């Protein structure tokens, strides 16, 4: 059922409009006694989920008993990050998801289904796991709050991904990431109906009908002044609600280009991007736009590690970002990567498959570390002086020497493709 829907490529929903839309949906839902909110963590700071969670707290007051950020495999949020993203919300409401321990298995998607949606490439079952608080917490309303935006693993982020991956377990996260990678990232991004989404929908339809989940979905884009604005808010408990948000996101967050790009420069905000696990969005979101033998330059002043989990970090350092056939060979022959398929998927996602050059400019990793994982290295200070993100505008820029570059100030907010690369 849909409780609220408003949005278009021209709409701008301020906090007043967001509150009105959210509260009208809550009014339709009726009184609740125990509410659980599941917003994203700080890596989705720009989603407006922090504002919506704050508004939820103002509406439900002491009936909002728990806030469980959908960490997935990310680091837990710091007190400083909670204060910034969820201003005014009491810290004692926040719970921490442990993707290895805090789990309840709702059911299992059979291998026959995985085999079908993967076009015969995979033949394993998939556990529909959630944080145990979702199953046993006794809540009469579970609010899944977040942004719909193009995504490298599932096609379009959010909806039930926030539940089954954001509060999911190691095996489910690993296998869903690997399914997306094996099927092909460039066949998935920007699409609402993908193999991974089919698996998540199977889990929702067959194992989670008893859970009182309502989705609160934003679509965020930039206005003519390059400022972030909310273009849409969609609230409901069904796939149609998500699909409407996804259709708008494709209009708002997708940029189709008439020609492939020879040089792309991406800036990673140091408060948001501290690892290549997240920073490789610069690769995921631009790969369909970059020309053969082109170059991607990643300005990453906050970069200090590869994986946000120690095990994954060590696997990235061990194997590096190599081609898909090489990763599949490693998975077949080595237990450590075979038992951590999300890391294997990440290595595939972060490879250009030898098609274009990736140059990382890190703030806290050495030249040797960057080159050891098969990226090229450039000094951050030198490159920020050359490509100053404060002076560049999003899109095409002509540098003083005549060089043409395409600049992206935040890769998490969009998807770019040469029109010949994006075909239904």
Image: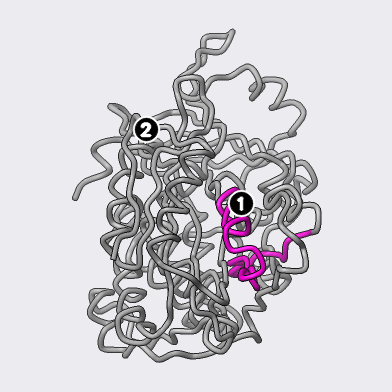
Mark 1 Cα shell of 10 Å, populated few (<14), some (14-19), many (≥20) = many
Horizontal placement of 255 versus 314: left or right?
A: left
Q: Residue at x 50, y 13 (%)?
A: 398
Dot 2: within a 10 Å radius of its alpha carbon, few (fewer than 14), some, or many (20 or more) residues?
A: few
Percent position of residue 95, x then y? 70, 73
Q: Is residue 324 above or below residue 403?
A: below
Which residue position is annotated with label 2? Answer: 11
Between the C-alphas of marks 1 and 2, the distance is 20 Å
Q: Position of residue 340 (x, y in %)?
A: 56, 78
Rendering coords of residue 423 (x, y %): 21, 46
Image point 77% across, 29% down: which residue?
A: 381
As helix, strand or loop, the secondary structure at mark 1 comes to helix
Residue appearing at x 55%, y 46% in the figure: 48
Q: Tell me if label 1 and label 2 are in contact, CB under 8 Å.
A: no
Across and down, in percent, residue 166 comes to 54, 69
* Foreground residue among 265 and 137: 137
In the rendered image, the quadrant that contains the N terminus is: bottom left
The segment highlighted magenta reads: 51-78
Numbered circle sitting on residue 179: none
Taking the magenta stretch, the answer to whether it contains residue 366 is no
Q: Helix, strand or loop at disc 2?
A: loop
Residue for point 31% across, 89% down: 111
The numbered dot on residue 50 is: 1
Q: Splitting the image into 4 quarters, where does residue 58 fall?
A: bottom right
The answer to whether any part of residue 110 appears in the image is yes
């Amino acid at each position: 059922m849909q409780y609220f829907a408003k949005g278009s490529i021209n709409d701008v929903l301020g906090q007043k409009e967001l509150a009105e839309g959210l509260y009208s949906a809550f009014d339709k839902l009726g009184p609740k006694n125990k509410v659980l909110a599941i917003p994203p963590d700080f890596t989705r700071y720009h989603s407006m989920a922090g504002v919506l969670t704050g508004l939820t707290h103002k509406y439900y007051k002491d009936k909002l008993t728990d806030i469980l950020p959908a960490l997935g495999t990310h680091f837990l949020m710091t007190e400083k990050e909670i204060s910034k993203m969820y201003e005014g919300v009491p810290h004692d409401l926040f719970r921490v998801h442990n993707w290895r321990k805090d789990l309840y298995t709702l059911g299992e998607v059979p291998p026959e289904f995985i085999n079908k949606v993967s076009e015969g490439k995979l033949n394993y079952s998939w556990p529909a796991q959630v944080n145990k608080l979702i199953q046993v917490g006794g809540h009469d309303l579970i609010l899944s709050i977040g942004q719909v935006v193009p995504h490298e693993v599932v096609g379009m982020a959010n909806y039930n991904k926030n539940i089954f991956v954001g509060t999911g377990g190691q095996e489910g996260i690993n296998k869903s990431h690997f399914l997306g990678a094996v099927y092909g990232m460039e066949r998935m991004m920007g699409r609402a109906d993908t193999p991974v989404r089919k698996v998540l929908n199977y889990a929702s339809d067959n194992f989670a009908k008893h859970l009182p989940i309502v989705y609160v979905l934003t679509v965020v884009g930039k206005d003519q002044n390059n400022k972030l604005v909310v273009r849409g808010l969609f609230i409901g408990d069904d796939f149609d609600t998500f699909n409407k948000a996804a259709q708008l996101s494709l209009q708002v967050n997708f940029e189709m280009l008439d020609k492939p790009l020879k040089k792309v420069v991406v800036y990673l905000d140091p408060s948001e991007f501290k690892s290549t696990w997240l920073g490789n969005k610069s690769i995921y979101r631009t790969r369909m736009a970059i020309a053969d033998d082109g170059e991607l330059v990643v300005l990453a002043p906050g970069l200090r590690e590869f994986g946000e989990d120690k095990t994954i970090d060590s696997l990235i350092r061990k194997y590096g970002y190599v081609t898909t056939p090489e990763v599949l060979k490693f998975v077949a022959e080595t237990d450590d990567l075979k038992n951590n398929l999300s890391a294997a998927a990440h290595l595939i996602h972060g490879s250009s498959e030898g098609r274009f050059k990736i140059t990382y400019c890190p703030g806290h990793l050495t030249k040797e570390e960057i080159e050891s994982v098969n990226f090229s290295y450039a000094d951050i200070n030198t490159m920020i002086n050359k490509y100053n993100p404060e002076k560049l505008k999003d899109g095409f820029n002509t540098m003083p020497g005549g060089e043409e570059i395409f600049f992206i100030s935040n890769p998490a907010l969009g998807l770019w493709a040469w029109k010949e690369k994006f075909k239904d």
